[in-house]
Image (cartoon, helix red, strand yellow):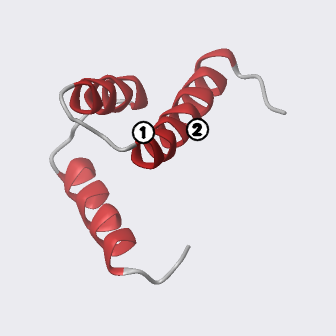
Amino acid sequence: MMDHPIIKQFEAHAELLDISGSVEAIDEAIVQLATWMDGLELSEDDQALLCHIGAVLYREGLRGRTGIRP
């Protein structure tokens, strides 16, 4: 992956989730993203970008549940 400070934060937080034994799955992350987005006044561009991210998460979660790969 990219060597970017935010990506490093994602990696560090993922490691903390593993260490703490978190069983939170992609579905919970999708719900959290949707709830957060719903409470904000987003620009059209920000809305489109976050919807794209949500779509990728949703697709990967669906693939994980069904075992279907492209």
Q: Give amino acid for label 1.
A: Gln
Name the amino acid type tagged 2: Val
Determine whether 37 is above or below 50 in the image: above
User: 18 or 4: which is nearer to us?
Assistant: 4
Give the residue number, with chain letter if any, for mark 1.
Answer: 47
Image quadrant in which the C terminus is located:
top right
Front residue of 18/40: it is 40
Asked whether, in this view, residue 25 is left or right of residue 70, the answer is left
Q: Which mark is residue 56?
A: 2
Q: Residue at x 62, y 28 (%)?
A: 59
The front one of 11 and 51 is 51
**How many marks are shown on the rendered structure?**
2
Q: Is residue 43 above or below residue 25?
A: below
Q: Position of 49 compared to 40: left or right?
A: right
Nearer to the camera, 47 or 60 = 47
Badge 2 marks a residue whose secondary structure is: helix
The local secondary structure at tag 1 comes to helix
Image point (24%, 59%), residue name: 13
CA gap, disc 2 and disc 1: 14 Å
| Residue 63, horizontal then vertical, whole percent | 66, 25
Question: Residue 10: percent from the left, percent from the top?
Answer: 32, 62
Q: Residue at x 60, y 21 (%)?
A: 62
- Crowding around mark 1 (Cα neighbors within 10 Å: few <14, some 14 to 19, many 20+) is some
Residue 24 visible in rendering: no
Q: Which mark is residue 12?
A: none
In the image, is residue 64 above or below residue 53? Answer: above
Image coords of residue 16 (percent x, y): 20, 57
Whichever of callouts 2 and 1 sits on the residue coming sooner in the sequence is: 1
